[in-house]
Image (cartoon, coloured by chain):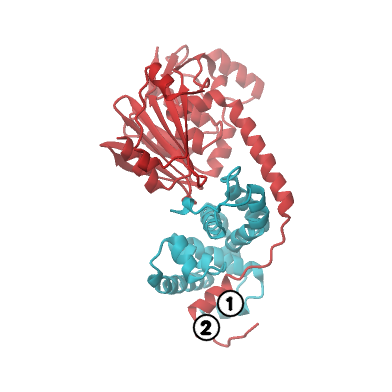
């Protein structure tokens, strides 16, 4: 190894090379491959388990594509009417903390009246026959070798906040939760979403992306306002302070849908697509991206293994 | 576009077995920890599972970006490690420029490199890491979409900035 009496005599390139030299790392690629396959299978099973949630989130969309954690925050966030999408940054420690928060079913009773998870593969004609007319970008932009259409039926779900459920949770978990406000107890919240269509494009080079179009979800409440419900939910143990602050700082919580962004894995910014504000989500590798925006009463998503610039071109092609 | 440069032959498994060690090494250069490096490598390959893998240069770029991002999310841990490194410095060397060949402790070098990498502009960090993972100027121009004539200048600027950050991290 060369020796230098005066380190300042070393050129910047040689200096960087010396500092960035890497030890030889021995790996067992076969074992790593088996681990990857196992992880992939577990993820698929997990995805199936949360099929309903994923379908609802298809209306609220990016959350299920980019943050596959069945977190309390996602359940909470789904009960807003989205007119504008804003990022909600969630760090690794936030995700860990949220996993320990009580689940929505610990605070009341919910039921699904019509599940959006009954997604079915159909012909383009069948989508039109179901009364949905998806807009698609020009073929020159998609350059697809295969296109598959899926129909997302409308979904309806309702949830009633109940103090008795909270009491049962407190007994069972031996944890104490904040008192449920009087006007929240008994409040029935109804969520309606869809119908919609998913158009999946595959290219010969292995790239894959989807365009989702969905009638915007609407939410009704029989009692408490969204602001009251939000305040109650974010006061739960396990909801990190920074997440709570981000939510309480929203300019218009009734119409701004915070989309969870994994702070360590994804990036987010706002762009304009056809006059509407779109949330642009990229992954740190530059290999994947997603755009979500609302135009009239339809929520659009373009997402897949494509660069942000291309996702934008496709989005503008739709508009 | 990065994702368009996909290798047209071989299965995912073939590609995985061929590229795994390279991807782990690339992540290790950033993170300095084999377990963390393998975690990042798994995340990188997970994105392509069931599909054909991109070329090695694209895989390296994806790895570098993910590893840098993992590093940035651990700023608190980095600050603690740096404080421990500084507290162990002999006072006589406090204000001297760092000599990479005099650092016999690999852990110390790792601490300084990580502290410097998180401070660099992402583009500079990527350029340096790809260069010292073996990419030549042509590879760098293609992978990072840089004008070939500007690679040398940008690299020199990144190397200068890197050295400055190393010195800043090393001086108590």
- Using a 10 Å C-alpha cutoff, classify the residue at mark 1 as few (fewer than 14 neighbours), some (14 to 19) or many (20 or more): many
Instruction: Say which quarter of the image contains residue A105.
Output: top right
For the point 74% across and 50% down, the residue is A31
Q: Which residue is mark 2?
A: A10
- Looking at the rendering, in which quadrant would you find the N terminus of chain A? bottom right
**Is the residue A116 above or below the residue B95 in the image?**
above
For this rendering, which residue is in front, B60 or A178?
Answer: B60
- Using a 10 Å C-alpha cutoff, classify the residue at mark 2 as few (fewer than 14 neighbours), some (14 to 19) or many (20 or more): some
For this rendering, which residue is in front, A250 or B128?
Answer: B128
Secondary structure state at the residue bearing disc 2: loop
Q: Position of residue A141 (x, y in %)?
A: 37, 42
**Badge 1 vs badge 2, beta-carbon distance below 8 Å:** yes
Q: Position of residue A194 (x, y in %)?
A: 41, 21
Residue B100: numbered disc = 1
Q: Gap in Å between the C-alphas at discs 1 and 2?
A: 9 Å
Instruction: Say which quarter of the image contains residue B156.
Output: bottom left
For the point 60% across and 49% down, the residue is B45
- In the picture, measured across the screen, residue A256 lies left or right of residue B74, that is left
The outermost residue toward the bottom is A5
In this orientation, does residue A58 appear?
yes
- Colour chosen for chain A: red
Chain of the residue under label 2: A
- Colour chosen for chain B: cyan
- Looking at the rendering, in which quadrant would you find the C terminus of chain A? top left
């Amino acid at each position: 190894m060369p020796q230098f009496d005066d380190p300042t005599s070393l050129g910047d390139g040689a200096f960087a090379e010396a500092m960035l030299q890497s030890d030889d790392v021995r790996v067992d690629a076969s074992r790593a491959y088996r681990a990857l396959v196992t992880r992939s299978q577990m993820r698929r099973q997990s995805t199936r388990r949360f099929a309903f949630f994923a379908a609802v989130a298809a209306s609220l969309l990016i959350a299920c594509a980019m943050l596959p954690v069945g977190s309390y925050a996602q359940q909470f966030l789904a009960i807003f009417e989205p007119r504008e999408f804003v990022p909600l940054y969630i760090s690794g420690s936030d995700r860990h903390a949220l996993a320990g928060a009580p689940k929505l079913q610990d605070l009341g009773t919910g039921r699904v009246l019509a599940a959006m998870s009954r997604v079915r593969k159909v012909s383009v004609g069948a989508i039109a026959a179901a009364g949905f007319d998806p807009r698609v970008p020009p073929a020159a932009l998609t350059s697809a070798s295969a296109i598959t259409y899926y129909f997302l039926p409308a979904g309806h779900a309702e949830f009633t906040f109940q103090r008795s459920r909270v009491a049962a949770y407190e007994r069972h978990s031996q944890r104490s939760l904040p008192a449920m406000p009087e006007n929240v107890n008994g409040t029935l919240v109804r969520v309606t979403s869809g119908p919609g269509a998913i158009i999946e494009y595959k290219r010969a080079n292995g790239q894959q992306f989807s365009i989702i179009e969905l009638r915007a979800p609407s939410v009704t409440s029989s009692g408490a306002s969204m602001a009251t419900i939000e305040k109650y939910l974010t006061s739960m143990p396990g909801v990190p302070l920074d997440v709570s602050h981000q939510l309480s700082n929203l300019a218009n919580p009734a119409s701004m849908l915070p989309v969870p962004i994994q702070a360590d894995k994804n990036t987010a910014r706002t762009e304009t697509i056809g006059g509407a504000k779109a949330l642009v989500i990229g992954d740190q590798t530059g290999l994947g991206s997603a755009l979500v925006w609302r135009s009239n009463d339809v929520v659009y998503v373009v997402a897949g293994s494509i660069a942000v610039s291309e996702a934008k071109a496709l989005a503008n092609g739709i508009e | 576009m990065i994702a368009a440069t996909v290798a047209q032959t071989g299965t995912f498994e073939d590609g995985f077995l061929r590229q795994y060690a390279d991807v782990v090494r690339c992540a290790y250069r950033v993170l300095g920890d084999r377990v963390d490096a393998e975690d990042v490598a798994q995340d990188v390959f997970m994105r392509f599972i069931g599909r054909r893998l991109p070329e090695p240069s694209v895989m390296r770029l994806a790895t570098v970006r993910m590893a840098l991002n993992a590093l940035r999310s651990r700023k608190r841990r980095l600050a603690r490690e740096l404080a421990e490194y500084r507290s162990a410095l002999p006072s006589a060397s406090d204000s001297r420029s760092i000599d990479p060949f005099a650092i016999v402790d690999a852990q110390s070098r790792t601490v300084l490199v990580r502290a410097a990498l998180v401070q660099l502009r992402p583009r500079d960090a990527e350029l340096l890491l790809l260069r010292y993972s073996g990419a030549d100027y042509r590879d760098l121009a293609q992978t990072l979409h840089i004008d070939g004539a500007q690679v040398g200048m940008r690299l020199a600027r990144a190397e200068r900035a890197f050295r400055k950050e190393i010195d800043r991290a090393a001086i108590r």
